[in-house]
Each structure stands twice: as C-alpha cells, then as structure tokens.
Image (cartoon, rainbow, N blue to C red):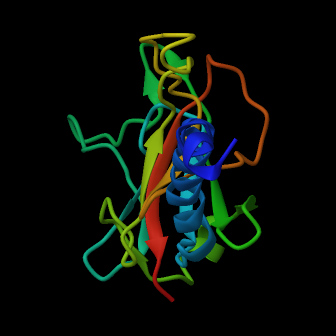
Amino acid sequence: MKLKQQLPLILAFAAPVILIGITALTVYIPKLHNKPKYDFIYTIGSYYPAYAVDASGHIFEETAPIQDGEVPNPVTKGGYTAPIPQLYYYDVATQKGTPITLDQAKKHQLSALEQSPDGYSIGYGGNDGVFPFFVSDSNNYNIRYIQGHGINQKINIATPIDSYNYNFQMIGWVIN
C-alpha cells in the first residue's frame, strides 16, 4: 500500500497517542517548575483554636474572654478538657512537619492570609473516586493539600491521629 492509503490508518492510531501526550504534558509540566517557597506553621489537636497571628505577624496564644471576673480554660468544651494543640513547622522543601514550641514559633514572622505570598493555599481532600469510573461525593477532611499554580501536593501530617481528635488549623505562612 502506498503512504496515501495508509495515512488515515496512521492518523487514527497517532491522534489518541498525541492527545494523551499533550494532556500528560499539561498536567506534569506545571509540577516541575511550580513549587511552593513558603513554609508554614499549623496545629493538630483540640478543636479550640488556641493560637492566632497578630497584626505584626507574630503568633500568640489565644485565651477565652473573661466571664464574671474569671478566665475560663480556653480548651474546655462541654465538661471535657482537651489538651492545647501541638504546633508544627512544615518545611515545603522536605515536605515534612516538625513539632515546635510556642517560643520557637514566636521567632518567625507569619502571614495569616489564606494564600501564601507566592500564591499557594491549603485545602482539604477532594473526591475519593476517579471520574467516570469511581464516582464519590464524599470529601476527605483529614487530608490536606498545598494547592495552586497547577499543583495539588499532599501535606505529610507529622503525627498519626484518629478521626476523633483530628483538627488541622493553619496558623500562618512563614515570611522570614
């Protein structure tokens, strides 16, 4: 057969391969060049937000408002006293969270904005299924991701936890 007769057959097999290649490139090329640059501090533990960032960018321990002349325990809810949440420093280069103290966290200037200065944010897990084969509407709230600029990078939580005491709270992006 001549090339002109084989051309439709060649195009029929080559077109899907080319489209798959283009799709793969558009998915994986952003991951090669776009990487988050800002580390962040987060907590895991109590459902009470025990830490916050002030206007100058420094972390502080929140306390409950004074009621009837007494300062209530900020992590007491319904008769149950939960421990103060553990602080962690997440290094985006190594993709690991390390436990830190409040004094160590105070040495960093933080941005409490939802988005980092380089345009990334923290989100939670999405659908468990892969459309159209395994469709699921449930969200996995226990998995966090750094999202933005075409990437969706899973955060390796520093400690194994169960669903009853899990509470991830983003404190702030480390500016310095």
The vertical placement of 80 against 5, above or below, is above
* Picture mark count: 0
Which one is in front, 62 or 89? Answer: 89
Residue located 52% across and 49% down the image: 23
Q: Is residue 49 left or right of residue 2?
A: left
The vertical placement of 167 against 42, above or below, is above
Q: Is residue 37 left or right of residue 74?
A: right
Which one is in front, 162 or 138? Answer: 138
Outermost bottom residue: 176
In the rendering, at what x and y percent does residue 25 appear? 57, 59
In the rendering, at what x and y percent does residue 35 appear? 57, 72
Q: Is residue 44 visible?
A: yes
Q: Is residue 84 visible?
A: no
Residue located 58% across and 72% down the image: 105
Q: Quadrant of residue 95?
A: bottom right
Which one is in front, 118 or 40? Answer: 118
The vertical placement of 103 against 138, above or below, is below
Residue located 43% across and 36% down the image: 48
The vertical placement of 175 against 68, above or below, is below
In the rendering, at what x and y percent does residue 78 appear? 42, 13
Q: Is residue 148 left or right of residue 40?
A: left
Q: Quadrant of residue 99?
A: bottom right
In the rendering, at what x and y percent does residue 168 appear? 53, 40
